Image: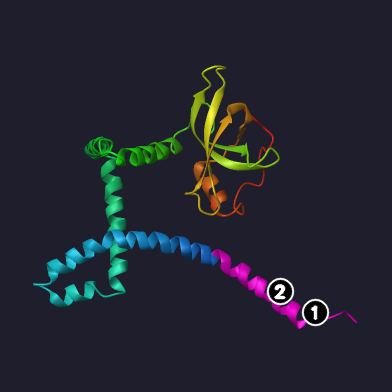
Amino acid sequence: MKNRPSRKTHVQRYLLAGVLTVIPVWITWVVFKFVLTQLSQIGTPWVKVLASGLRSSAPTASEFLLHPWLQPALAVVITLIALYLLGLVTTRVIGRRLVNGFDSLMVRIPMVQNIYGATKKLVASLSAKPGRLERVVLINFPNQDMKTVGFITRVMIDKETGRQIAAVYVPTTPNPTSGYMEIVPVERLTTTDWTVEDAMTFIMSGGAVGPDRIDYKDTV
């Protein structure tokens, strides 16, 4: 007669199964909650302005717009529409000129210029291919026996040897907005054929979503 699992083992097994089921849902909710909260905070002042404008002509509608459950939702919608219109405008010639003018203004403000300029360059660097190299690479990190995914942000030249040196940003899992900055010789990089989107998905999912094969040992 087979030994039946104890009550404690039974509870632990199903409790663990429940936790593993909830974790992806919880992480998804945390990310979406953060994004929606930020969008809501951006759009809330505009909702209040709209409600204030309707107060004299339509007081009922004004009060309805400020309802606790409607105001955040409307704020998110307004922000998304504004972002869409902003993207539409910036792709036009006049919009690009306005953006360039705004950039020129930002780089003239002390302290702000450092943060804004660095962020702008990082975003621009990730959207273009760094010469003959692929954007997404693997590097030996945190030691020679392990590798991690990184993004080449620029390639420099050693002033004494002429050796190519890459600046590689290594994001953390599951939050890719934090990470490490590594300086790595180009010949020690392992190239991949991944897009930035593929790599970000791989990082945020903890490696659960990604390619079935990878050139682990290939180098430039």
Q: Earlier in the sequence, mark 1 or mark 2?
A: 1
Is residue 45 toward the left or the right of residue 132 in the image? left
Residue linked to disc 2: 13
Residue for point 36% across, 41% down: 115
Report the magenta residues as a range.
1-24
Is residue 24 toward the left or the right of residue 39 in the image? right
**Which quarter of the rendered picture does the N terminus lie within?**
bottom right
Q: What's under tag 2, amino acid-wise?
A: Arg
Q: Position of residue 102 (x, y in %)?
A: 24, 39
Residue 115 numbered tag: none
Residue 5 numbered tag: 1
Task: Please tell me whether residue 14 belongs to the stretch shown in magenta.
Answer: yes
* Front residue (pair 64, 156): 156
User: Tags 1 and 2 in contact by the CB under 8 Å rule?
Assistant: yes
Instruction: Specify few, some or many for label 1: CA neighbours under 10 Å numbering under 14, 14-19, or 20 or more.
Output: few
Task: Please tell me whether residue 17 belongs to the stretch shown in magenta.
Answer: yes
Q: Residue furthest front?
A: 111
Circle 1: element type: loop
Q: Quadrant of residue 146?
A: top right
